[in-house]
């Protein structure tokens, strides 16, 4: 397990990121002060349910936010010391694919359907590594081998629709790894895959970290996947980070009421429950956010004090954004 | 001794696909047999393309099986006439995965729930309305929701409407096709609890189709594991999860992410073969870590051992 993030300055530091959406019901705040760090050789998971802002966080790091409808309203995204948000577009473009690469959920919609696989892998290799001719093909075959595609030369002329879902996701990862980036952002890369294929892809991502030292920001809704591959985990709810910490600590002793509810509502494979515990209600709409703690209306610990924005409490190695965190954990101020 | 409600024997379904002159036959399910007992929840699990949804739909004749029989209440559903089938549909209902795609966007909740009563000519309009309101309350919606349209609801609420629709005729069995797969974890738990509550109250049977093995373990009494259009193993929940026999079931169990104290994951080689050209012999032999010579040539017969069934040469 990597602990580099705790000693050296983080490779990626998202600080207090605020992001607005323009909607027909006025402007809404999709991210309300999100801070996430990813260290060297670290795999960090972002978990949360639909609409919590995990994908939009990933897109802002990549600089792929839809123009016109989204606006960064504050905060910074530092990558190796540079603030990506103030970087000129040209430099940012050069960085994409070379330093930071992305793997999307659905390879079928993110690969170009009318471009052979070989050309799609060759593109970043030509662009960022400056290779030409046969050297490009050599390099492409090399990365395809690394992601475990058998007879890689044969698939170069194939189009995405000719490959299976698992193969397409391998190709996506090959493209992401092609220029040996320092950071890969993976947005639900295994969600569309079957469980036996998911295992293969997770192995592959851990291997990429172990072999090339790539850091990974892994976005998922599946706590099982987090448990399997992430060193640290960030739990998001309604546009805010509610809890962060080492994966084993957060999953074995969650401190935020939302994380606790999430863990309890999962059917367990190890113990037998008659009924599942649930979190009452549902996630509030972006244009109808409660004041103060956004989890308050669904939280069994909440009282009037929770109408104020909660502080970040540090308990052990965990950071918990909750007024009640110490009370719930039975930890008191020293 | 459990009493059988539905007995499916050697069910097959072929689809003809592809453009003219290049037609080919895909055998979506290839001789599936199982029994659903009264008051039981039977899980159908497997990966995409294994035929679990086709099996669920063919079992209540939402799609016409190509061959095989489905014994229900003394008749063979596979060969019963249209008039009788319409009457029997009262007993056989379905909940779909995507409640948004399976609710008519131009009908209010009340219209959606009243339609089955109209088709089956049940009750006066006042009685129908009362029945609809009862069901709305039972699935945890409010009376005011009756006049609203599907787009006004969240995913979890929409699935409650889908469940209400399946309950309105007091069915004997419900096929639930991935009913919680599209939902977030916290909402998924609410819907699973609701499905268990209505079953406890009405005592119907479920065929629960899912790829999520933790959910299946929570809700099912027995489980049938499918691979490439065939049932490879059937067992009680506890037997299957404690000691899976078929190599495919073993791999599936070991691949559940984040299973605490789990043994090393058995990583299967390669992809699921195309259902258009399943491998000869045992369909799983191309990926099976324990494949033997016989597996390449002879399809294994399902054998019964200790109250469970497994189709694998290792146990012959």
Image (cartoon, coloured by chain):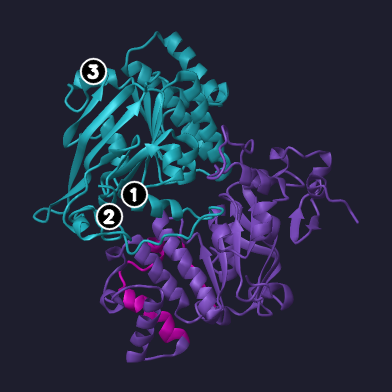
**Residue ID at (32%, 64%):** B270
Could one spot residue A111 in this view of the protein? yes
Chain B color in figure = cyan
Label 1 neighbour load within 10 Å: few <14, some 14-19, many 20+:
many
Q: Name the residue under label 1.
A: B246
- Looking at the picture, how far across and down is residue B256, in whole percent? 47, 53
Chain A color in figure = purple
Mark toward the viewer: 1 or 3: 1
Q: Give whichever of discs 1 and 3 has the lower sequence position.
A: 3
Q: Nearer the viewer, residue B8 or B310?
A: B310
What secondary structure is marked by label 1? Answer: loop
- Name the disc covering residue B74, or none: 3
- Looking at the picture, how far across and down is residue A123, in whole percent? 40, 80
Taking the image as shown, residue A121 lies to the left or right of residue A250, namely left
Name above or below for residue B262 compared with residue A126.
above
Q: Nearer the viewer, residue A44 or B121?
A: A44
Q: Mark 2 points at which residue?
A: B284
Name above or below for residue A184 compared with residue A307.
below
Residues at circles 1 and 2 in contact by the CB criterion of under 8 Å: yes
Label 2 neighbour load within 10 Å: few <14, some 14-19, many 20+:
many
- Looking at the picture, how far across and down is residue A141, in whole percent? 35, 81
Instruction: Please provide the residue range marked out in magenta.
Output: A100-128
- Looking at the picture, how far across and down is residue A265, in whole percent? 59, 41
Tags 1 and 3 on a common chain: yes
Could one spot residue A193 in this view of the protein? no
Q: Give whichever of discs 3 and 2 has the lower sequence position.
A: 3
- Name the disc covering residue B145, or none: none
Distance (Cα) linking label 3 and label 2: 35 Å
């Amino acid at each position: 397990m990597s602990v580099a993030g705790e000693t050296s300055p983080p490779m990626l530091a998202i600080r207090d990121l605020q992001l607005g959406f323009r909607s027909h019901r006025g402007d809404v705040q999709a991210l309300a002060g999100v801070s996430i760090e990813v260290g060297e050789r670290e795999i960090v998971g972002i978990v949360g349910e639909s609409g919590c802002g995990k994908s939009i966080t990933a897109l802002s790091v990549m600089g792929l936010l839809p123009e016109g409808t989204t606006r960064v309203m504050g905060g910074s995204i530092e990558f190796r010391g540079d603030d990506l948000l103030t970087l000129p577009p040209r430099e940012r473009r050069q960085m994409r694919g070379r330093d930071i690469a992305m793997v999307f959920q659905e390879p079928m919609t993110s690969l170009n359907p009318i471009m052979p696989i070989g050309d799609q892998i060759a593109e970043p290799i030509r662009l960022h590594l400056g290779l030409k001719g046969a050297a490009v093909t050599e390099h492409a075959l090399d990365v395809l081998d690394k992601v475990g595609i058998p007879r890689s030369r044969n698939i170069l002329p194939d189009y995405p629709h000719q490959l299976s879902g698992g193969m397409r996701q391998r190709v996506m990862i090959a493209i992401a790894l092609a220029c040996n980036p320092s950071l890969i952002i993976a947005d639900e890369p295994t969600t569309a895959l079957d469980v036996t294929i998911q295992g293969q892809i997770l192995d592959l991502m851990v291997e990429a970290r172990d072999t090339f030292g790539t850091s990974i920001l892994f976005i998922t809704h599946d706590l099982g996947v987090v448990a399997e591959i992430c060193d640290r985990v960030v739990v998001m709810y309604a546009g805010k980070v509610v809890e962060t910490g080492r994966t084993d600590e957060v999953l074995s002793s969650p401190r935020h009421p939302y994380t606790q509810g999430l863990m309890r509502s999962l059917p367990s494979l190890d113990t037998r429950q008659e009924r599942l515990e649930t979190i009452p209600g549902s996630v509030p709409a972006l244009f109808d956010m409660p004041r103060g703690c956004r989890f308050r209306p669904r939280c069994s610990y909440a009282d009037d004090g929770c109408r104020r924005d909660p502080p970040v409490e540090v308990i052990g190695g965990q950071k918990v954004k909750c007024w009640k965190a110490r009370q719930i954990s039975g930890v008191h101020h020293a | 001794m459990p009493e059988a409600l539905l007995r499916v024997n050697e069910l097959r379904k072929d689809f003809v696909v592809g453009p003219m002159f290049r037609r080919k036959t895909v055998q979506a399910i290839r001789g599936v047999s199982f029994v659903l007992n009264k008051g039981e929840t039977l899980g159908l699990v497997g990966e995409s393309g294994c035929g679990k949804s086709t099996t669920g739909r063919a079992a209540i004749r939402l799609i016409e099986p190509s061959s095989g029989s489905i014994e229900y209440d003394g008749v063979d559903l596979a060969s019963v006439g249209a008039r009788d089938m319409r009457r029997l549909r009262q007993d056989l209902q379905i909940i779909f995965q995507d409640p948004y795609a399976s609710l008519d966007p131009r009908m209010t909740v009340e219209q959606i729930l009243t339609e089955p009563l109209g088709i089956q000519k049940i009750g006066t309009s006042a009685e129908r309305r009362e029945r609809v309101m009862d069901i709305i309350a039972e699935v945890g919606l409010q009376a005011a929701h009756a006049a609203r349209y599907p787009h006004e609801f969240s995913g979890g609420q929409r699935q409650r409407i889908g469940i209400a629709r399946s309950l309105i005729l007091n069915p004997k069995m419900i096929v639930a096709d991935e009913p919680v797969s599209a939902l977030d974890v916290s909402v998924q738990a609410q819907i699973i609890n609701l499905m268990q509550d209505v079953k406890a109250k009405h005592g119907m049977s479920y065929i629960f189709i899912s790829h999520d093995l933790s959910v299946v373990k929570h809700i099912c009494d027995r489980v049938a594991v499918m691979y490439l259009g065939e049932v490879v193993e059937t067992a009680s929940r506890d037997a299957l999860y404690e000691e899976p026999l078929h190599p495919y079931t073993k791999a599936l169990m070991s691949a559940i992410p984040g299973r605490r104290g789990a043994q090393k994951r058995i990583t299967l080689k390669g992809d699921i073969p195309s259902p258009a050209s399943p491998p000869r012999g045992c369909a799983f032999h191309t990926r099976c870590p324990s494949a033997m010579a016989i597996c390449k040539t002879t399809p294994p017969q399902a054998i019964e051992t200790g109250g469970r069934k497994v189709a694998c040469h290792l146990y012959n």
